[in-house]
Image (cartoon, helix red, strand yellow):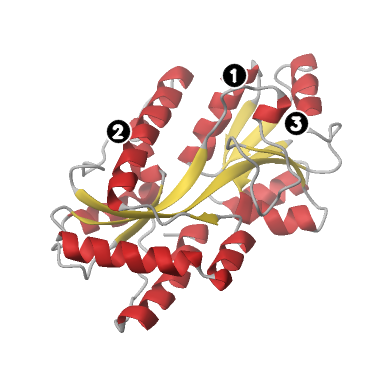
């Protein structure tokens, strides 16, 4: 886990430690877009002492990686989606456009001239979908992290960036980045003045990141329901709502059944995006 995932894990873990009287130890297992840590959890005993917090990359990986050593559905027990967040399309104030509509017009008038950076599989597919739906010729550049991407966007080394709202937020507030649009179908509470991609004239655009909690397959239902219930309570508390907003996120606290349904629907969305973009597993 890294970045926003780690922040969510620590915030929720601290609250669960207080309400359940059990310590929650956060262990980061980065690598292979989260697949390394996920593979370890898939083999853990379903006793409630080993849990997995991952992003939507959990269901994207099979479409962008040649070998994923687990089944993202069959090998896990869904507990809850803790929070959601869109990507945000950003640019430096020095770029010759100030809005999403202006960027689209500029890109169409200058095909192949604009570059756009991404830092993970989700943002890469979001950009590919944007290119297809808007008919844009943008050159993608892959980055290993949001920090390096942010620096290059602010420095003008890459014209645009697709990044998490949490990464973009402080630089947007300081005026070092322009936020052109968020990628989900509704505006986000952390940046309510920033329009959606749909508002720029690209209909049906709704792609966002979620942060989900899972256990190994076979996790007993009483444990699942207790964890979901306590997490939902924590997410509804004012301090947690405010904290998530600072990270560019909105709390959710979905039930296990709702979480499974979200996974099914979103798997179809991301699989279709990968297929339409011609993305091949690497």
Is 150 positioned to the left or the right of 26 in the image?
Answer: right
Q: Earlier in the sequence, mark 2 or mark 1?
A: 2
The residue where tag 3 is placed is 100
The residue where tag 2 is placed is 66
Q: Answer few, some or many: residues within 10 Å of disc 3's Cα (few below 14, many 20 plus, some between 14 and 19).
A: many
Q: Earlier in the sequence, mark 3 or mark 1?
A: 3
- Give how far apart the Cα atoms at labels 3 and 2 are: 34 Å
Q: Answer few, some or many: residues within 10 Å of disc 1's Cα (few below 14, many 20 plus, some between 14 and 19).
A: some
| Whether residue 201 is situated above or below residue 150 in the rendered picture | above
Give whichever of 248, 72 is nearer the camera: 248
Residue shown at the point (62%, 50%) measured from the top left: 165
Rendered image quadrant of residue 264: top left
Give whichever of 211, 32 is nearer the camera: 211
Helix, strand or loop at mark 3: helix
* Total count of labels: 3
Helix, strand or loop at mark 2: loop
- Give how far apart the Cα atoms at labels 3 and 1 are: 14 Å
Residue shown at the point (56%, 24%) measured from the top left: 204
* Quarter of the image where the C terminus is located: top left
Helix, strand or loop at mark 1: helix
Is 279 positioned to the left or the right of 153 in the image?
Answer: left
The mark lying in front, picked from 2 and 1, is 1
Q: Position of residue 75 (x, y in %)?
A: 18, 47
* Quarter of the image where the N terminus is located: bottom left
The residue where tag 1 is placed is 133
Proximity of marks 3 and 1: CB atoms separated by less than 8 Å: no
Rendered image quadrant of residue 266: top left
């Amino acid at each position: 886990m890294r970045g926003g995932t780690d922040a969510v894990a620590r915030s929720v873990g601290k609250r669960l430690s207080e309400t359940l009287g059990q310590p929650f130890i956060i262990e980061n297992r980065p690598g292979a877009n989260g697949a390394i840590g996920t593979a370890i959890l898939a083999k853990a005993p379903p006793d409630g002492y080993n849990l997995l917090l991952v992003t939507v990359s959990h269901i994207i990986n099979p479409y962008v990686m040649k070998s994923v050593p687990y089944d993202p559905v069959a090998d896990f027990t869904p507990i809850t989606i803790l929070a959601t967040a869109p990507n945000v399309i950003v640019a430096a104030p020095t770029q010759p456009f100030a809005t999403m509509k202006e960027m689209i017009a500029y890109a169409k008038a200058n095909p192949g001239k604009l570059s756009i950076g991404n830092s993970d599989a989700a943002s890469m597919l979001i950009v590919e979908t944007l290119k297809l739906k808007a008919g844009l010729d943008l050159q993608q550049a892959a980055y290993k992290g949001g920090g390096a991407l942010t620096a290059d966007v602010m420095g003008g080394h890459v014209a645009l960036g697709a990044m998490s709202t949490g990464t973009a937020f402080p630089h947007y507030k300081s005026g070092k980045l322009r936020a052109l649009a968020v990628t989900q179908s509704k505006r986000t509470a952390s940046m309510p003045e920033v329009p959606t991609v749909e508002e720029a004239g690209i209909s049906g655009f709704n792609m966002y990141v979620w942060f989900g909690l899972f256990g190994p397959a076979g996790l007993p239902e009483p444990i699942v329901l207790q964890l979901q219930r306590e997490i939902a309570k924590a997410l509804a508390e004012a301090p947690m709502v405010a904290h998530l907003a600072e990270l560019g996120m909105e709390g959710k606290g979905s039930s296990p059944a709702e979480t499974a349904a979200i996974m099914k629907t979103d798997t179809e969305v991301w699989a279709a995006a990968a297929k339409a973009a011609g993305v091949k597993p690497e």
